[in-house]
Each structure stands twice: as C-alpha cells, then as structure tokens.
C-alpha cells in the first residue's frame, strides 16, 4: 500500500500555482525556442546549441551548469558531438535532490506536415513542431515549474537538477547512459527523478517492459538458380523458422500475461515483432535497371524484437527462440543457424510506494481532482539507464502531451497541459523539498 503523505499546506500550493499561471507567455516562448533548434537524431544535430541555450536560460537563475560531451558513444563525432547539460540549483540547506530529465533529440519528420516542423507555431492552445510533444514541451514545463518554485520558496531544502540529454530516441547511450556511468544518477547525488515524457496528465509511468533484439541467420549453399537441387536455399530454411514461430511461438506468447499496467492494454502480454527480413541478393542500387542473376541464396537473416514482461526471465526468452530453431533443425536436413544478440533491456518498474510516486500521485489528485493512474510503457525509455547503471530506483515518467502524437506529422503540445503538469511537478517539489 502506498503510504499516505501529509497534505502540503494549501497556501503554498496556491502561491506556486499563481506564479506558474503568471508565466504562461514565458512558457510558450521557451517551448517555441526549443522547437526552433532542430535537434534531429539521427544524425544528432545541434546538441551543443540546445545545451548552450539551456545554459543561458538557467545560469542567471542560479543553476550551476555542466556541459558534458559523451565522447566515443555511438554516433559521437566532431561533426555530430553528443552534448548533454546537467544544471543544478542548490537550496539553502540539506535535503533531497529532485532531478528532471528530458531528452533534447527529436526524430525525423516524415511526410504530411501541414505546419512548419521547426516553426513553433502557436494556434489556440497548441504549439506545433517536431518534438513539441516528445518532449520539448515537457522540458519547458519542468523549467518553468523549477523557476517558479525557486522564486516562490527561495529557502528550499536539497537541490533541483534539470538535464537535457542526447540520443534517447536511439537508445540513450550518448545521453543518460553516459551520465549514469559518470555518476550523475548516483543515489547519493540524486534521490528522485521525474522524466517529463508525454504519458498523459493524470498518468504516472512506473517503468517499461523488457527488450530483447536478436538477429537470426539461416545458412544454405550457393548454386545456379536453374539447378537449385545442387544448392541449399537459406530462404526456405528461414520460411520453416517463420512457420514454426506461427505454429508454436506466437500462441505461446499470447498466453503470457502481465500484472504490469502497460498501456495500451494490447501490450499487457509478451510480443514479438519481425523487424526485418533479408535473404538472397541485395536489392539493386538506385538507378540500376538490370535483372537479378539466378542464385540459390546461401544466407537469410531476420531481426526479431521481443518485448518481455517483468514476470519473465531473459534466459527463458532466449531459450524459446532456441527451442524454435532446434525444433526446425530436428526436422530439416542440413539446417544450420546462428543467433546473435543485438541488445537487451531488462524490464523496470518503480514501486507504487516509492517517494516520488506518492508525491506525484498526491499532486495529481490535488491539482486535477482525480486519482493518478499508474501505467507502464510498452517500449523502453531512459529510465532503463537510471535503473540499471545508476542503480536509482526512485524514478518515474510524468509529463504533458499526448503519447500518440509522438513521432507523428503535425505533432503539437497543449499549453494548458504544460501549465497543469508544471503545477503537478511544482506541488511535488513542495512535498519533497519543503515539508
Ligand atoms: Zn521521448
């Protein structure tokens, strides 16, 4: 059972809410500025620029700012350096540190935009642009919340940190993972982490399912395509693997249900995506108009994306795939395969009675007048590094924006949602740093 928290005094909440409301224009301008710095990843553009922007913003407000380049992480180069910022504002006396972590990268644009993706256009309650929802709106809301809190209660305990980190969309290795390795998420330094990802205003995201990516290769023997009996077709072998997956594996995965409150509900079970499939000759280069040559393929490769549950063990997840391959091997002459792990992420879920969870839950109830909903993300995000590398368990995702808009054309964030989430975060700060 979550332990109940003392109600923070209403006068403090009212003062802070008034202060946040008064900063609406500042919030809009800040969000627009962030959207107008195109931080597309890949390749990882303008990380330095957005860190410098944040430094210019936060330094005059008493934050000590460190710009940290994640040297030699995937994608880091002199052309596309992986820059991160960690800004820390100490209170007047000892206490906990609350850290707001936002990724600064945004994904490619795709087609069908009707708004300028880097314009930051304000239309009614909506600010449009790539990254507005995922998650520059959340970053802006956390900054406004922190600034309003510091100005209203200059004598707070502990510290507030705000980080802007690279590469979340491509695994976070040049961002949160790197910072965690350098000790920035050490529980001695930071006690509470809120990641303002767009999960829904009344939702506290406790964690995510696990990920296991692997490449399966079936092998064959090359020969002339007119005499396939002289070779051995790797694509047919892979076809047998797919068929066995349909027969035995997919039905098995459907029976594996989780108690994790994953949203959407369809993801409350084990899932397997075939991410890519390739066998035989390469697709012709652009501009090539000739015909393929007749070849029996000697290799077929498939990349699988298995999402698993907190109730499952990674070794069992791997064994299921090996079982499929061994079964096919027992049935097919000359069947040979290889399996290579690409990446693994262990599921993580913060306890409902963790202090940051109970603080934000009380703040949601007080600000929005309804109980918090506890959710788990179907895909992973930077919490994995904070948990696995930083060993910091007191971490959630909570922020403004509609999850379904992430990575879509005409992505937007609502100003009213940013204001409300800033109030929830601010109320949590009152709870964690004043009481
Ligand atoms: Zn995101």
Image (cartoon, rainbow, N blue to C red):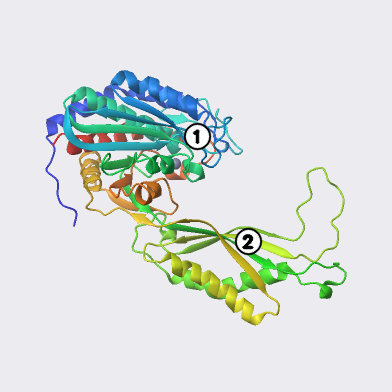
SS at mark 1? loop
Q: Please state the horizontal and vertical placement of residue 56, each as a whole percent of the image.
A: 39, 20
Residue 379 visible, this angle: yes
Q: Residue 82 carries which label?
A: 1
Mark 1 or mark 2, which has the lower sequence index?
Answer: 1
SS at mark 2? strand
Mark 1: few/some/many CA within 10 Å (<14, 14-19, 20+): many
Left or right? Give the position of 301 relative to 340: right
Give the position of the N terminus as an image quadrant.
bottom left
Q: In this view, does 122 lie above or below 185?
A: above
Q: Please state the horizontal and vertical placement of residue 97, each as a whole percent of the image.
A: 24, 37
Q: Distance between the residues labelled 1 and 2?
A: 30 Å
Give the position of the C terminus as an image quadrant.
top left
Q: Which mark is residue 302?
A: 2
| View quadrant of ligand 1 | top left
Q: Residue 322 carries which label?
A: none
Q: Going 70% across and 77% down the picture, which residue do you hit? A: 334
- Please state which of residues 427 and 116 is positioned toward the viewer in this rendering: 427
Q: Is residue 302 above or below residue 254?
A: above
Foreground tag (1 vs 2): 1
Q: Please state the horizontal and vertical placement of residue 349, each as a whole percent of the image.
A: 33, 55
Q: In this view, does 64 lie above or below 379?
A: above
Left or right? Give the position of 232 relative to 86: right
Q: Please state the horizontal and vertical placement of residue 411, each as a whole percent of the image.
A: 49, 36
Q: Going 69% across and 71% down the picture, which residue do you hit? A: 237
Left or right? Give the position of 374 relative to 407: left
Left or right? Give the position of 227 relative to 53: right
């Amino acid at each position: 059972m979550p332990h109940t928290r003392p109600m923070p005094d209403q006068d403090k909440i009212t003062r802070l809410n008034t202060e946040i409301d008064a900063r609406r224009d500042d919030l809009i301008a800040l969000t627009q500025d962030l959207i107008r710095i195109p931080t597309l990843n890949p390749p990882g553009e303008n990380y330095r620029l957005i860190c410098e922007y944040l430094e210019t913003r936060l330094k005059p407000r008493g934050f000590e700012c460190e710009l940290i380049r994640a040297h030699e992480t995937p994608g880091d180069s002199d052309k596309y350096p992986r820059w991160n910022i960690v800004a820390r504002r100490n209170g007047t006396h000892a206490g906990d540190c609350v850290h707001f972590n936002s990724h600064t990268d945004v994904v490619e644009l795709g087609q069908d935009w009707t708004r300028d993706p880097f314009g930051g256009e304000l239309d009614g309650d909506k600010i449009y642009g790539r990254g507005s929802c995922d998650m520059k709106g959340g970053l802006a809301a956390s900054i406004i919340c922190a600034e309003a809190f510091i100005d209203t209660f200059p004598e707070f305990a502990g510290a507030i940190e705000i980080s802007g980190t690279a590469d979340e969309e491509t695994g976070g290795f040049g961002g949160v993972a790197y910072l965690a390795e350098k000790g920035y998420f050490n529980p001695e330094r930071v006690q509470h982490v809120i990641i303002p990802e767009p999960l829904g205003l009344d939702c506290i995201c406790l964690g995510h399912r696990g990920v296991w990516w692997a490449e399966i290769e079936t092998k064959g023997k090359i020969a002339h395509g007119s005499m396939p009996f002289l070779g051995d077709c790797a694509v047919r072998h892979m076809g047998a693997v797919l068929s066995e997956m349909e027969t035995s594996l997919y039905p098995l995965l459907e029976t594996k249900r989780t108690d994790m409150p994953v949203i959407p509900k369809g993801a409350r079970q084990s899932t397997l995506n075939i991410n890519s499939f390739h066998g035989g000759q390469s697709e012709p280069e652009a501009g090539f108009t000739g015909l393929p040559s007749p070849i029996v393929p000697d290799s077929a490769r498939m990349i699988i994306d298995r999402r698993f549950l907190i109730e499952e063990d990674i070794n069992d997840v791997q064994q299921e795939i090996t079982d499929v391959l061994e079964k096919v091997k027992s049935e097919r002459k000359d069947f040979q395969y290889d399996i290579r792990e690409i990446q693994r992420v262990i599921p993580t879920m913060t306890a409902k009675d963790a202090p940051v969870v109970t603080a934000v839950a009380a703040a949601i109830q007080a600000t929005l007048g309804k109980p918090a909903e506890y959710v788990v993300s179907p895909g992973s995000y930077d919490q994995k590094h904070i948990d696995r590398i930083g060993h910091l368990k007191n971490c959630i995702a909570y922020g403004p924006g509609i999850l379904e808009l992430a990575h879509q054309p005409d992505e937007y964030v609502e100003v009213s949602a940013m204001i409300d989430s800033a109030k929830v975060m601010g109320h949590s700060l009152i709870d964690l740093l004043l009481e």
